[in-house]
Amino acid sequence: MKLLPKQPRVNTEDSLGLGIEAAVVIALFLGFGYVLDRIFGTMPVFMIVMTLLGAVGLFAKLKYRYDDRMDELEEQRRSSTEHKREAA
């Protein structure tokens, strides 16, 4: 029994989605660092380390996503060029 209408999938490739994802990841790592600092009594150390770790990981993820997308588009361009040459 379906009570809710089917929701369309959200496009995660848009800029707003990537920006929100970046903000949430940084906030989560900052919060986790804050909790670790409170537990161990080393106030700014874990906050700084975890925030930097989250930022580096996020940057790497975005870079690899970008590289994969560029490879995909380059392959599409090559195949389109080959089809045009074959047609001529």
Image (spheres, rainbow, N blue to C red):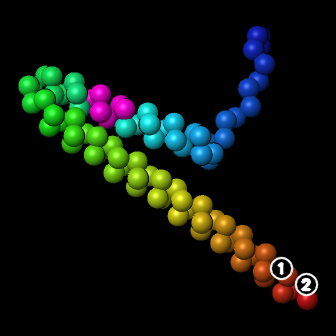
Quadrant in the rendering for residue 45: top left
Tag 2: amino acid? Ala
Q: Taking 67 as reference, is 42 left or right?
A: left
Q: Point out residue 18 in the picture as x, y percentages from the top left corner.
A: 54, 43
Q: Nearer the viewer, residue 83 or 15?
A: 15
Q: Taking 48 as reference, is 75 left or right?
A: right
- Considering the image in quadrants, where does the C terminus appear? bottom right
Identify the residue shown where x is 33% and y is 51%.
Answer: 56
Identify the residue shown where x is 75% and y is 14%.
Answer: 4
Depicted 77 relative to depicted 88: above or below: above
Residue 29 drawn in magenta: yes
Residue 64 drawn in magenta: no
Q: Which residues are magenta?
A: 27-32
Q: Taking 62 as reference, is 3 left or right?
A: right
Identify the residue shown where x is 51% and y is 36%.
Answer: 20
- Considering the image in quadrants, where does the N terminus appear? top right
| Inter-mark Cα distance, 2 to 1 | 6 Å
Contact between marks 2 and 1 (CB within 8 A): the answer is yes
Q: Taking 51 as reference, is 70 left or right?
A: right
Disc assigned to residue 87: 2
